[in-house]
Amino acid sequence: MDWVTQVTERLRATGGRMTAQRRLILETLAQCTDHPTAEEIYQRARQRAPDLNLSTVYRTLRWLEELGVVGSQRFEGERPQDRFDPAISANPDHHHFRCRLCNAIIEFPAPLLDLLKRDFIAQYGGTIESASLTFYGLCQSCLQKVEAYGPLSFNPDAILNHPR
Amino acid sequence: MDWVTQVTERLRATGGRMTAQRRLILETLAQCTDHPTAEEIYQRARQRAPDLNLSTVYRTLRWLEELGVVGSQRFEGERPQDRFDPAISANPDHHHFRCRLCNAIIEFPAPLLDLLKRDFIAQYGGTIESASLTFYGLCQSCLQKVEAYGPLSFNPDAILNHPR
DNA sequence: GGCTTTATTGCAAATGATTTGCATTAAGGA
DNA sequence: TCCTTAATGCAAATCATTTGCAATAAAGCC
């Protein structure tokens, strides 16, 4: 049984209805290999159905989030907007690395996080229900480029006063 | 030399000016033991200077952020707003636990995070410049309350239809 | 101390992602 | 096929945060 059908069943089980718009959004999500914003999902889906509405995209995404089918998360260094993660349903225990230069996002498992959780509980008590870990840095290929060419010298004054 | 004076020196060194408003905001931050929002800082500071402006608070906070004097971070499960962290200048390497019930935030060190970073680099290459780790769960005292009394049964219908 | 430069403020208006109210449409069980 | 009500489209509202601009006031200089 494919992903869209699985989600449809979860939906029906909670009194929801499968619509053309929801199916389209689900199929769009299924094809994502990245972490798109609501607007990006809207644009991609709209290529197949131009009268799709952005509100519907938001409502569908929030509903999928409640079902645990997609995750959402914000990254530092860009304007505050949710990015959605269709991979979370297939692989719930992953975290994110984000490249500061090319903005690529790498998903990685972090089994050692359990050690950190145990340390925390041992010291402070309580329970931990979820954890969010994000690394920021340079991905392998951006690092290689920087190492190969050296950092670019950026001097706005020199650019502005440069003779044409 | 106290904190406000230290920050003033950093400020002057970059061509900035120390004003009554900035001093007030700094002193307000120095007294924080929590992670207030811009609005909360504004309300606290305004008790001493009622004509302080919220824009000034925002501008001052962003400037302190650039200087590395305060940190900012958003937490899940509340509306999207920045919370500011004056403790980051004294103790840069801390992470956050947030209690889902009482909303308390606990700061904790996580030296083991270096293992996770090393693991990541070994597998994917690149470099890691910063990391954000947040735990969500129940703090010790909320956990004890839940264990002592059991979870509350919340049934809106029963409340609405309850005879008075 | 007064003068000058320009960083900073207060105010109001703009921004931009996200949510919401409501009339209309359509899913899916009877 | 009919009926109930969940879902959509549209426009307007939200709400934290930012920004333009005229007025104010640091702080370097005489």
Image: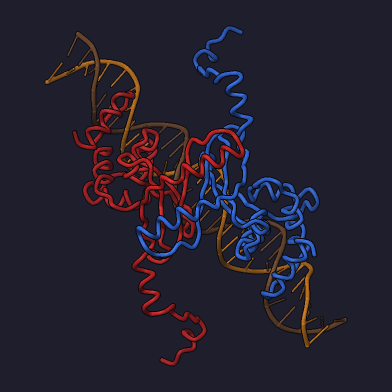
Chain colours: A blue, B red, C orange, D brown
Depth order, front residue of A2/B117: B117
Image-based side of A47 in relation to B34, left or right: right
Q: Residue at x 50, y 17 (%)?
A: A155
Image-based side of D3 in relation to C6, left or right: right
Image-based side of C3 in relation to A162, left or right: left
**Residue A72's spot in the image, x, y percent?**
59, 54
Depth order, front residue of C10/B46: B46
* Depicted A103 relative to depicted A61: above or below: above
**Residue D9's spot in the image, x, y percent?**
72, 58
* Depicted A135 relative to depicted B12: above or below: below
Depth order, front residue of A121/B103: A121
Location of the N terminus of chain A by quadrant is bottom right
Q: Going by the picture, which residue comes out furthest to the bottom?
A: B163
Depth order, front residue of B72/D20: B72
Q: Quadrant of residue A162?
A: top right
Q: Residue at x 46, y 42 (%)?
A: B114
Q: Quadrant of residue A143?
A: top right
Number of marks in picture: 0
**Residue A3's spot in the image, x, y percent?**
75, 61
Q: Residue at x 40, y 50 (%)?
A: B83
* Depicted A159 relative to depicted B29: above or below: above
Q: Residue at x 30, y 40 (%)?
A: B90
Image-based side of B111 in relation to C30, left or right: left
**Residue B84's spot in the image, x, y percent?**
37, 47
Location of the C terminus of chain A by quadrant is top right
